[in-house]
Amino acid sequence: MRRDVFQAIATPTRREIINLVAKQSLNLNSLTENFNISRPAISKHIKILTECGLVVIKQQGRERYCEANLESLAHVSQWIEQYKVFWTNKLDALGNFLSKEPGTVSKPAIKKATLKSIKKNRK
Amino acid sequence: MKHEPFVIERTYDAPVEKVWKAITDKDQMKEWYFNIATFKPEVGFEFQFEAGSEDKKYLHLCKITDVESGKKLRYSWRYDNVPGNSFVTFELFAEGNKTRLKLTHEGLETFVTDNPDFAKESFVKGWGHIIGKSLKEYVEKKF
């Protein structure tokens, strides 16, 4: 089963859970109070978040608290960064191609228009 | 936490028609983008190309979803045998005799990263090779 940061942030509920626990550690009951869905449903999301490594459960006395572990979110920006490099290079290459490509479209277009106006003037 | 699509913009000193041709004509695409056997800017048209490093190639599978001639080209972009799907959009805006190109790549987060075959290094390496070496050499040799 797929368990990574992308899976973790794939649903609005889990994103909201991350937002909440990023501010402060919360136990399951306090977390559930923020949602209109059942405690077991929240519990299931927490399970996925812990499996994805974004949330860590810490035992404090009789309570289990959910704590955010946001380091893995950096994977998302790293992943996007690769595409930034890729597209930056590709669009630079396009720029080089456009400036060096001999058969320009703009020149004939201007020439045609100029020719037309010359012909008109001759008439 | 919402996934913002990746966006990059460039302004080229070339008219829209010329840029449109460069992104839709396979002979021109080959010179800066990828070598694609057949390409037609038509909705539903599917094309594919291999890209990656010398030792590991990824088959890229694309299907055109939107075409507005001279303005917009959008296609899906995924990898053979890799879960996930993304969409690449090229939008062209005439600015005098220049053309502003806006490229949007949505859905990048849908690709798995914990698969070692699909790891970051191989990508950067692959692209670095294609763009930094092959393409540069080709362009400089040709012109």
Image (cartoon, coloured by chain):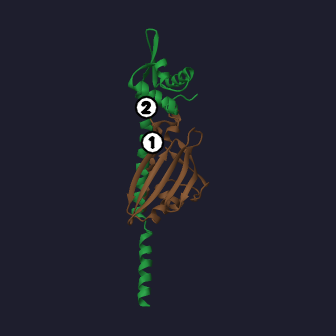
Residue B67 location, x and y as percent? Answer: 55, 58
In the depicted view, which residue is nearer to us: B97 or B78? B97
* x and y percentages locating residue A80 in the rendered image: 44, 40
Chain under disc 2? A
Residue B70 at x, y = what percent? Answer: 49, 62
> Which label lies toward us, 1 or 2?
1
Locate the C terminus of chain B and report the quarter of the image it occupies: bottom left
> In this figure, which residue is indicated by the disc labeled 2?
A73
What is the display colour for chain B?
brown
Q: Amino acid at mark 1?
A: Glu
Residue pictured at 44% horizontal, 74% vertical: A109
Query: Pointer 2: residues within 10 angstroms few (<14), some, or many (20+)?
Result: some
Amino acid beneath label 2:
Leu
Query: Real-space Cα distance between discs 1 and 2?
Result: 14 Å
Residue A25 picture quarter: top left
> Is residue A36 shown to the viewer in this render?
yes
Image coordinates of residue B132 in percent, x first then y, are: 41, 49
Question: Do the residues at pointers 1 and 2 share their chain?
Answer: no
Q: In the image shown, does B53 or B114 lie closer to the viewer?
A: B114
Q: Is residue B136 visible?
A: no
Chain in green in the render: A
Judging by the rendered image, the residue that carries numbered circle 1 is: B4
